[in-house]
Image (cartoon, grey):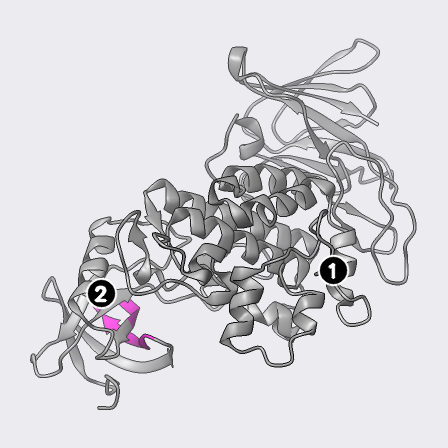
Amino acid sequence: MVNGMLAPGQTLVTEEGEKVKVADMFGSGGQGEVYRVRTRKGDRALKWYYPQIADNRQRQILEGLIACSWSDDRFLWPQTVVVDADGRLPGFGYLMDVRPDRFRDLPALFRRDPAIAATTQRTLVTAALHTVEAYRALHGKGIAYRDINWGNIFFDPHTGDVLVCDNDNAVFEGESAGVAGTMDFMAPELVRGDRGAQPGIQSDLHSLAVLLFLLLMNHHPLEGALALQIRCLDENARKKLYGTDPVFLYDPNDTRNRPVPEEQQTVVATWGALPPILQRLFVETFTDGLKNPLRRVRESQWRDALSEVLDTICVCACGRQNLTEPNGPAPHCWGQNCGRPLTLPPRLQLTIGSGRTRTEPRSVRLGPQARLYAHHMVVEAERHDFTAVVAEVTEHPQQPGRFGITNRSGTRWTARRSDGSVHDVDPGRTIGLSTGLQLEFGGGAEAVVRD
């Protein structure tokens, strides 16, 4: 045995007394090694800690997380502690589910890995939204992740689904743990080592914003001209860049760290294509939020903005997906060889709820194959589920270029045309799209089609 490495065929035992057998090794990291193991319920993943990590504090953290009995499919959550069946091998590990093959690591995006070539703008925004909602759920349980970075979250390049891994360092807010974070994702007060500063939910919000910027911009939010001037990016240089003198690339009042166009073309292009609703949130969290943790953008703010942008993605004639501003003007296509003004499709202005919970109208662009989901029909969705389709824009089978909205729900709608005529739209039926068309979906959800 070297550094706690387990042998194929070795028998271990869970705290409940179930025996598991080591099959093969998935890989290793900074804290331990991960193996596939056989259990009576099928294959599981086992993280086995290196001896120097397997101390009493790590065991306490692990047992506290397991006691939560949290079964959220966005997290590979620790399920049970595992030890050597014979008691001869010191240390311990824990079982979790095996990560499905469809999930890829985020660095694959930045490597431009061919395996994620199918990733679209819609997929990236969806992944960002799911990421925000996952950490919102974690924080809602009073748990701080403490080490949000691009190595701990995986995504499906086809659907945007996400999976959060390495959850064994998360702790309940206020508790201490050995992991403080990864420096280029850490909040400035942690990088500086300010008196009393501890990793927690507020520092998680900074790390989450860095992750979102990387996901959407393919670049770090604090690495512009100042980073290019550094000859040796050693610990002191990194501490200044991320802690003692952090400057956002697009800080409106401090231009020292603007991206250098000749060397950092990607972030220049992607920032220019980002809708103002997201630009404003990044500016807020990376200016005021760098100085005051209480000014950092909350998960609910990211969720609402990303959800609105997702509803207004438009496809240019060149085929490029473009992020647009909800209810905003038509931007120019950001395609490198295009740049033409976008022709925006009609929008559905959706209002839901009743009384004091009645919402302001929300716009959904009605391009080909646009959809409404169950989360559109509630005031505040806890989670966006893109499998729960309630309506879909479809093309007329005999009249190309003519579109309608098809009822994919299980209830009848009422449609009112601008000429005053009223029509029932049963499940599976379609009503032609026209300006002024009003739709009553039931439960207080209503919409009107606008140009």
Residue at x 50% of width, y 42% of height: 299
* Chain part drawn in magenta: 31-46
Residue lying at 44% horizontally and 52% vertically, measured from the top left: 204
Q: Residue at x 39, y 52 (%)?
A: 73
User: Residue 423's quadrant in the figure?
Assistant: top right
Q: Is residue 185 magenta?
A: no
For the N terminus, the image quarter is bottom left
Image x and y of residue 180, in percent? 37, 62
Q: Is residue 163 above or below residue 344?
A: below
Q: Is residue 207 above or below residue 361?
A: below
Left or right: residue 171 versus residue 362 is left
Please tell me whether residue 33 belongs to the stretch shown in magenta.
yes
The nearer-to-camera label among 2 and 1 is: 1
Q: Type of residue at label 2?
A: Gln
The tag on residue 140 is none
First in sequence, mark 2 or 1: give its number: 2
Query: In terms of depth relative to the viewer, which is nearer, 390 or 287?
Result: 287
Identify the disc placed on residue 58. 2
Image position, residue 214 (x, y; %): 61, 60
Res 136 seen here: yes
